[in-house]
Image: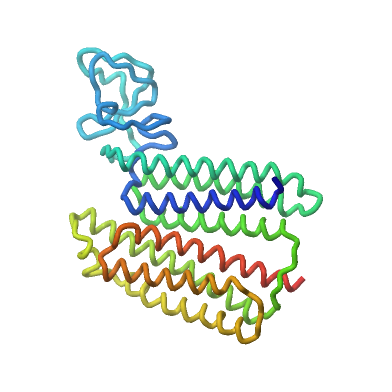
């Protein structure tokens, strides 16, 4: 397998992590595993609350977690329980006080972590394979190892999200970092692909491309704030999805109105590309994704969050970002 295929495989896995993360948000499974990197102290998480309940004459390995009196306790050492609970064998879990077990949430979050581990492995393989590119282009090797570092940093960010019990700011940073990793891998793929693009260099088109990319990032951040508001509504006991945005914060109106700005900016690029025959075929995909984004956003507001709409909305935004960034790379290449 050549390096370009390895890099594209790594990119696919990173996008799978984004999809898995969207499923975690959609199902509310962010605290399905209260610790990190294990899940309730297990490499393969439990399926039944009995596994997390203290009982006499049971063997617990060091680090295993139980739920007792609505709190988490961690086994200090390998131990065999007696007839009564021996507090000396356990220590309170101090990262947070969230002590709820939901099998579905646990396994959805575990799946997210598993995909993340596979993505990290794919990026590591890409980095090792990049040594063959050293003589050809040192940037490829250096950036590939930077991606490995960023994947590790992203894993640490995931842990801080759990320890903070899904702090909204940390969730936003976690999402933006995923897009940064996507951008670096796309740049690596661009550097490793020496074929000339059949596009016409146009300074205005390139500059507007940068603006549209920034607008997309702003939309993503605004979207996470809206999502935070929805999460808070659910936590406060609003169970009817039709009521989640009945009295939204101002961030929702910014997000909705800003989508028009994003669409018009990209429409300008689409028309300019068509008028001057610049050859940027990916702008067609951008417009289709934007339309799909608008439709999914309208569905959430007017059809009361149909199943999967939130995940689709997020994944489409991340794909849109990737295509826009690669178009910038294609436009920049023409200056050489």
- The residue most toward the bottom is 275
Can you say which quadrant of the picture contains the N terminus? top right
Q: From the viewer's perspective, tell me whether residue 260 is left or right of residue 322.
A: left
Provide residue 168's location: percent of width, then percent of height. 36, 56
256 vs 232: above or below: below
Foreground pick, 24 / 308? 308
Frontmost residue, 224 versus 273? 273
In the image, residue 336 sits, relative to residue 143, either above or below, namely below
Q: Nearer the viewer, residue 97 or 255?
A: 255
On the image, the x and y values in percent for residue 175 come to 46, 56
Horizontal side, residue 78 vs residue 233: left or right: right
Q: Residue at x 27, y 39 (%)?
A: 102
Name the residue located 43 percent from the left edge and 30 percent from the top edge. 43
- Image position of 25 with respect to 336: above or below: above
Q: Residue 195 appears in which quarter of the rendering?
A: bottom right
Which residue is pictured at 62% across the width and 79% down the height? 205
Residue 138, horizontal then vertical, whole percent: 76, 52
| Image-based side of 6 in relation to 136, left or right | left
Question: In this image, 82 relative to 204: left or right?
Answer: left
Please identify the quarter of the rendering in which residue 314 is found. Answer: bottom left
- Tell me where residue 220 sits by quadrant: bottom left
Q: Quadrant of the C terminus?
A: bottom right
């Amino acid at each position: 397998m050549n390096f370009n295929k390895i890099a594209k495989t790594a990119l696919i896995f990173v996008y799978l992590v984004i999809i898995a993360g969207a499923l975690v948000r959609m199902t509310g499974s962010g605290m399905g595993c209260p610790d990190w990197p294990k899940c309730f102290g297990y490499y393969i998480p439990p399926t039944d609350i009995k596994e997390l309940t203290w009982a006499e004459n049971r063997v617990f390995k060091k680090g295993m977690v139980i739920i007792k009196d609505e709190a988490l306790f961690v086994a200090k050492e390998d131990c065999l329980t007696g007839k009564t609970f021996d507090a000396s064998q356990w220590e309170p879990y101090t990262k947070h006080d969230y002590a709820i077990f939901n099998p579905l949430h646990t396994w959805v979050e575990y799946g997210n972590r598993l995909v993340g581990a596979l993505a990290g492995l794919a990026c590591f393989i890409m980095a090792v394979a990049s040594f063959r590119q050293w003589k050809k282009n040192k940037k490829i090797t250096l950036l590939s190892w930077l991606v490995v570092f960023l994947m590790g940093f992203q894993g640490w960010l995931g842990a801080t999200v759990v320890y903070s019990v899904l702090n909204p700011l940390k969730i936003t940073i976690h999402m933006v970092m995923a897009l940064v990793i996507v951008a670096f891998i796309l740049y690596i793929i661009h550097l490793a692909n020496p074929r000339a693009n059949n596009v016409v260099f146009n300074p205005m088109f390139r500059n507007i491309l940068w603006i549209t990319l920034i607008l997309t990032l702003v939309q993503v951040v605004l979207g996470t704030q809206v999502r935070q508001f929805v999460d808070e509504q659910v936590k406060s006991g609003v169970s009817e999805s039709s009521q989640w945005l009945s009295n939204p914060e101002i961030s929702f109106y910014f997000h909705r109105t800003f989508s028009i700005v994003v669409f018009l900016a990209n429409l300008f690029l689409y028309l300019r590309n068509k008028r001057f025959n610049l050859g940027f075929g990916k702008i067609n995909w951008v417009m289709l994704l934007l339309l799909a984004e608008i439709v999914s956003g309208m569905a959430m507001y007017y059809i009361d969050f149909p199943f999967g709409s939130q995940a689709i909305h997020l994944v489409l935004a991340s794909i849109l970002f990737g295509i826009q960034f690669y178009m910038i790379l294609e436009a920049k290449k023409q200056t050489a």
